[in-house]
Amino acid sequence: MKTEITELLGIKYPVIQGGMAWVAEYHLAAAVSAAGGFGIIGAASAPPEIVREQIRKVKELTDRPFGVNVMLMNPNAADVAKVVVEEGVKAVTTGAGNPAAYIGMWKEAGIKVIPVVASVAMARMMEKAGANAVVAEGTESGGHIGSATTMTLVPQVADAVKIPVIAAGGIADGRGVAAAMMLGAKAVQMGTRFIVAKESIVHDNYKERVIRAKDIDSEVTGRSTGHPIRVLRNKMTREYLKMEADGVSLEELEVLTLGSLRKAVMDGDVVNGSLMAGQIAGLVKKEQTCQEIIEEIMQEAEALLHGDK
Ligand code: TUI
């Protein structure tokens, strides 16, 4: 399927992997790119030199293009921004903030810039600042979220900007891809389905929780602190939400979440860990290779879009 995004990124399928903290490391990114999608290293809060190593490891595994997600709440974001230039990645996506300060430098280096946005205003601002595309990410997504749904955000962003729009949030199969295209998207970004990919290094306990998740098994912590984060319900979310309702201070809440994503991904602590996942987790039923995931989804999407199904 050829779209403005497959052309922009030099990929076979309009499927981009989310830049998930701890999850989106080199094995996953390389596997997604090798399968014809666009793999992404999630820099999250990693030190710049670790991001550099990760980039080099992807290059050892595949010649296909891939990108890096720069998480703007990372205190090291400015240094990570320089590393992606030095290492010459194809594209950068950004999250959890405004990347305007880096766009000029990235574009000068020939890097395609694709900010993740959660509103029309932010999408317009990014287009003016020189972005090549935007990811319009709905509140169905896992992790740090905005408030608009994918169904409402994608068509409004597509109407507001001329650059191509990538839909994210609540997409995990061919129906979601076809629907996103109908809403005006030129590609999709998926996270949750790739958490359970064979090539994903996420602990089996976490993968199992995603696979067993039902439609209404996620919660949003941090609505009152200004950092809403969607995660699967467990002991940590129950305690967090109770403390939040009781008006406990930000510092005390942070103690509960500090390092909790690492605990879930690396140690498989599904009780106290932060199991970031989107609302579509209920649709994710099995572990498959990235190639199986992408080909299954794209076959279904193409059949739907051509009216054969
Ligand atoms: O960034 C994400 N999702 C994430 S980042 C993350 S790591 C993290 N862990 C704990 C606490 C905080 C972060 C986990 N999940 N998605 C992209 C995204 N960006 N969603 C919403 C936004 C966003 C929000 C505000 C983008 C721009 C924005 O603008 C604010 C501004 O500065 O104008």
Image (tube, rainbow, N blue to C red):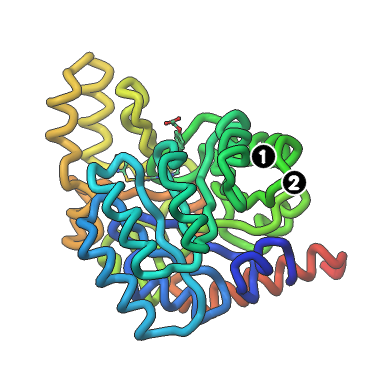
What x and y, as percent, mark residue 290? Answer: 48, 75
Identify the secondary structure beneath mark 2: loop
Which mark identifies residue 60?
none
Label drawn at residue 183: 2
User: Which of the 4 image quarters holds residue 15?
Assistant: bottom right
Which residue reaches farthest front?
108
Examine the image and state in which quarter residue 241 appears. top left
Q: From the top left corner, tell me how far across and down residue 280 is, in percent.
A: 52, 51
x, y percent for residue 145: 44, 37
Disc 1 designates what residue?
151
Among the two numbered marks 2 and 1 on one chain, the one whose residue lies closer to the N terminus:
1
Q: Is residue 276 above or below residue 123?
A: below
Please state if 92 lies on the left or on the right of 184 as rendered: left
Q: Position of residue 270 (x, y in %)?
A: 23, 52
Quarter of the rendering containing residue 172: bottom right
Camera-side residue of 179 and 5: 5
Kindly identify the amino acid type of the residue bearing the numbered disc 1: Met
Q: Quick check: which quadrant has ligand 1?
A: top left
Q: Judge whether residue 282 can be spotted in this image.
A: yes
Tag 2 and tag 1, C-beta contact below 8 Å: yes
Q: Is residue 22 above or below residue 38?
A: above
Which residue lies at the image location 61% right of the left edge and 52% below the top edge?
132
Tell me if residue 53 comes above or below residue 60 in the rendering.
above
Q: Residue at x 59, y 67 (%)?
A: 9
Q: Residues within 10 Å of mark 2 (few under 14, many from 20)?
A: many
Three-letter residue code for mark 2:
Leu
Q: CA distance from mark 2 to mark 1?
A: 7 Å
